[in-house]
Amino acid sequence: MSTSQATHQDAELILKLYDLRREPVMREARNFVFGFAPKSVDEIVALTNAFGTKENAYLRQVYGYWEMAAALVVHGTLNALLVYDTCHEMYFVYAKVQPFLEEFRQKSGMPDFLYNVQKVVEGSAEGRERLARVQKRQAEMARMAAAAAK
């Protein structure tokens, strides 16, 4: 992964990735994924098998987007440190499914699901630390939501 000095081309690509996230349907998809809080691998499998639904399309769009962005890092096209500093959302959406990832890959028949995202997020000590912080915050948010619902 490219950790050399970021270039103007890296910056332009980051800005392009940002613009793509602002597209109206992508915003809808991101809103759905932000609210998606799977409690089991079966919830994720069910959603990925719900072909033809808006929710399935949203899930594929967001996770496909981040897998594409991570592949740019893995293949050296995009500076890894710049992605770390600017693409916090990738860690957030990955944190939601990471506890279920290996089992999901087996049950779904998709052994490469989020392969590049996993490499980027878990490929450095800083990335693993951020993942742990994000997962802790997501657990806190879930507890607060559950308490508010009572």
Image (cartoon, rainbow, N blue to C red):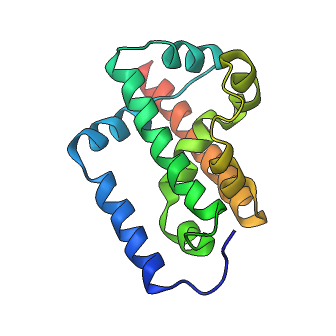
Left or right: 112 in relation to 144: right
Quadrant for the N terminus, please: bottom right
Residue placed at 55% from the left, 70% from the top? Answer: 78
The part of the image, by quadrant, that contains residue 127 is bottom right
Residue placed at 51% from the left, 19% from the top? Answer: 48
Residue 113 picture location, percent across and down: 64, 34
In front of the other: 130 or 146: 130
16 up-or-down from 55: above or below: below
Quadrant for the C terminus, please: top left
What is the count of numbered marks?
0
Left or right: 75 in relation to 72: right
In front of the other: 13 or 42: 13
Residue placed at 54% from the left, 12% from the top? Answer: 46
Left or right: 105 in relation to 69: right
Residue placed at 66% from the left, 83% from the top? Answer: 4
In front of the other: 98 or 20: 20
